[in-house]
Amino acid sequence: GESVGLHLPTLSVQEGDNSIINCAYSNSASDYFIWYKQESGKGPQFIIDIRSNMDKRQGQRVTVLLNKTVKHLSLQIAATQPGDSAVYFCAENGGSQGNLIFGKGTKLSVKP
Amino acid sequence: GAVVSQHPSRVICKSGTSVKIECRSLDFQATTMFWYRQFPKKSLMLMATSNEGSKATYEQGVEKDKFLINHASLTLSTLTVTSAHPEDSSFYICSAPNFAQGVNKETQYFGPGTRLLVL
């Protein structure tokens, strides 16, 4: 999960296990949410998105859950692989310029 | 999918010099582009919104005279860090939505980022 602090929250999982990454978003008016994966030294890569009229959406090995009541998003990764190691950011479309607002990020480390 | 490129991928410069970073949308037109800055182990923070044909909109606390933005065409935005100082060292990332018909305009496509190191 996330915390206010100087260091990126870290989630360490064993290869093959399922991972759950959590995110609290800020703007109750946001109606579109995206999960991004960012590998070291690279730009964010789109993983999956969800609109506020849904509470769950599945992709290949990934599932996003949305709880609007508590402004909470989660990303579930099934059968986590070493290639999934990265920092994961949630983003919401509540920016005043049409920009995305990013969450603090969670570093996922997968142990072989 | 839509592709966004950035150039250069990394740059090292001396304090006091200016550095230009280019952001290009390769297979779609981007009337709007966003410039983010990311410090180590931190999230992406929006610096400014680049608009083709009009002035950029800067976020609070971002000096427009220091970070010059020019949206030169429908596929190119440039960010110039003027009189760079060591505290400007960061990872600069651009993104663009695709407003083409039938495309989700809210999905942002990110460039690979530019690592700036000011000595």
Image (cartoon, rainbow, N blue to C red):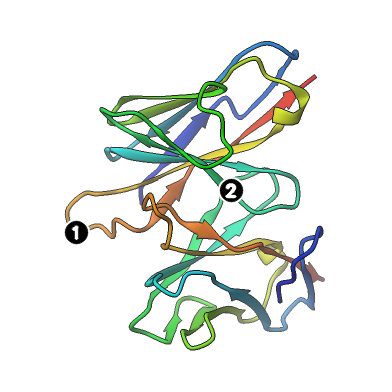
Circle 2 crowding by C-alpha within 10 Å: few under 14, some 14–19, many from 20: some
Q: Chain of mark 1?
A: B
SS for tag 2? Answer: strand
Under mark 1, the amino acid is Gly
Left-right relation of B27 to B101: right
Up the image or down, B22 lies above or below A69; here it is above
Mark 2 on the same chain as mark 1:
yes
The residue at the far front in this view is B60
Which element type, helix, strand or loop, lies under badge 1? loop
Mark 2 = which residue? B45
Quarter residue B91 falls in:
top right
Q: Residues within 10 Å of mark 1 (few under 14, many from 20)?
A: few
The location of residue A19, given as percent across then percent down, is: 68, 80
Q: Tell me whether the residue at label 2 lies in contact with that at label 1, contact meaning CB atoms closer than 8 angstroms.
A: no
- The chain ID associated with circle 2 is B
- Identify residue for label 1: B102
- In terms of image quadrants, where is residue A31? bottom left
Work out which quarter of the rendered image holds the C terminus of chain B and state it.
Answer: top right
Question: Measuring 73% from the left and 21% from the top, which residue is drawn there?
Answer: B85
Nearer-the-camera pick, B43 or A86 = B43
Q: Mark 2 or mark 1, which is nearer to you?
A: 2
Among numbered discs 2 and 1, the one appearing first in the sequence: 2
